[in-house]
Amino acid sequence: MMKSFRDRLPAPAGQRHDLSPWSVLKQSMGKELTRITMPVVFNEPLSFLQRMTENAEYYPLLVQANNSDDPVNRMELVTAFIVSTLSSNLDRLNKPFNPLLGETYELQREDYKIVCEQVSHHPPISALHMESPSVIFEANLCPKLRFSGTQIIIKPEGRMSLTLKRLQETYSWSHVNCVVHNILVGKLWFEQNGQMHISCKQSSLQASIKFKPAGSDQRDLHRFEGHIIDGDERKIRCVFGKWTEYLKVAPYHDLDHSPRRTSEGPRKMYAKLNRLTQSLTVGSSPAGKSSSAEDDNLVHPDWRLLWEANKRPEHSKDHYNFTMFAVALNELPEGDELQRLPRTDCRFRPDIRKLEEGDLDGAALEKSRLEEQQRERRKALKKEGKQWEPLWFKETPEGSWAFTGQYWKREFSAAPEIF
Ligand SMILES: CC(C)CCC[C@@H](C)[C@H]1CC[C@H]2[C@@H]3CC=C4C[C@@H](O)CC[C@]4(C)[C@H]3CC[C@]12C
């Protein structure tokens, strides 16, 4: 029988009334993410470690990729997976809790298992390892925040890599920036911005995708567009869509060289013309927006849909805009499953627990207690001239963090008391 998880949080989110993020953030100019302290009303009841595991929501795309015998199709599916990892960010404008040093999180779903650990506090580095019969997925994440005018620009640094096990094929990619708008006044909103490169060492295929700014009329809100490129730098596929909704792929037809020129030419021209006149006459009306998607389909009549975002739960708006996947992440398991978790697991953090129960004051108290305790531990270590050693990941000579594999032996007696 399929295991079932909770479909809502125990309590709706607290209201932040008119408290603007700026009133708090102005003291944090130029600071690292972990040095910014904000009132808990700005938090969501998840640790950043839990938030990272949301990458796995569309895991079945990876199984599909691993089973495919066509390298281009594998690249298409991996690209779809990578774009899908961004989708849960839509409207998630509360800050996940900064993990304490040594905090861990584990997640086992379908046929995969994930371990995350906070391996460094300054700078904040979170490490993730995911393994299944089909794939190994590793991520190191160190988000850097910069304030600029009325927006926050988040530069996620760190290495991402994926291995499809059947053919031992490896993929790596870069992050794009995300921008939180309107931190002074108005409604907060969020966009992904910049160029992403995905490359596969063995097949020499690459994907290059541009996440577009919304533009003044919001016509390109959440849109991305790009190509899959072969080892000779030739474009072979177009990929496009909205990172919040879907990804489509279509063959690339070079207007000058394609044998389909005659049949495609007029259609493309028509689409372009159509787009031009639409943008002239409709402008920023909602009709103008939807027609942009229609144009895409006209320009690429032979598109295929590779990924579509799951619907958010009904009560998502009152629950921090969580996806169904996110809702279940902080659920406490029962019986044996609970017994075998290490005491460093996020699910035991009292501040996160209190926030999800709607107890804001309790959460705030616990949060400052934990942070104070962490400072004390840090001082004590320093006095002894020691350095913090993560338990489950080791730093490599290249400066990234590799999973040691020991976690799954489940010998947690050495796990520190951090909550
Ligand atoms: C109160 C306000 C304005 C501050 C809120 C800051 C929130 C929205 C920020 C803080 C850290 C950010 C995350 C940092 C790193 C990544 C990895 C990247 O690949 C996707 C975006 C993602 C997951 C960011 C999403 C937005 C984020 C959660």
Image (cartoon, grey):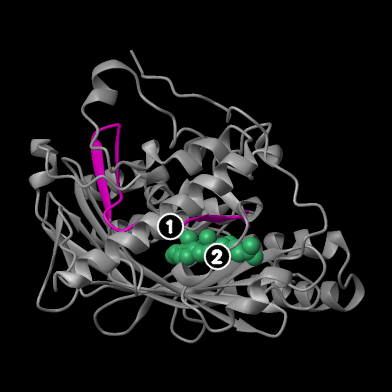
Q: Residues within 10 Å of mark 1 (few under 14, many from 20)?
A: some
Q: Residues within 10 Å of mark 2 (few under 14, many from 20)?
A: some
Magenta stretch containing residue 101, yes or no? yes
Residue 282 in picture, x, y percent from top left: 89, 70
Tell me the quadrant of the picture where the C terminus can be found. Answer: top left
Residue extending furthest right?
A: 281
419 sits to left or right of 41 = left
Q: Amino acid at mark 1?
A: Glu
Q: Which mark is residue 371?
A: 1
Which mark is first along the chain, 2 or 1?
A: 2
287 sits to left or right of 108 = right
Residue 251 in picture, x, y percent from top left: 44, 66
- Point 30% across, 58% down: residue: 101
Badge 2 marks a residue whose secondary structure is loop
Q: Quadrant of residue 380?
A: bottom left
Residue 407 in picture, x, y percent from top left: 13, 44
- Provide the residue designation for mark 2: 37
- Point 83% across, 75% down: residue: 279
Q: Are marks 1 and 2 in contact (CB under 8 Å)?
A: yes
In front: label 1 or label 2: 1
202 sits to left or right of 5 = left
Magenta stretch containing residue 308, yes or no? no
Question: Between marks 1 and 2, how big is the CA–CA gap?
Answer: 10 Å
Residue extending furthest top?
A: 1
Residue 180 in picture, x, y percent from top left: 64, 70
Q: Which mark is residue 239?
A: none
Q: Which residues are magenta?
A: 92-117
Tell me the quadrant of the picture where the N terminus can be found. Answer: top left
- Point 20% across, 66% down: residue: 381
> Looking at the image, is 56 positioned above or below residue 70?
above
Q: Amino acid at mark 2?
A: Thr
* In the image, the residue with mark 1 has its CB under 8 Å from the nearest atom of ligand 1: no
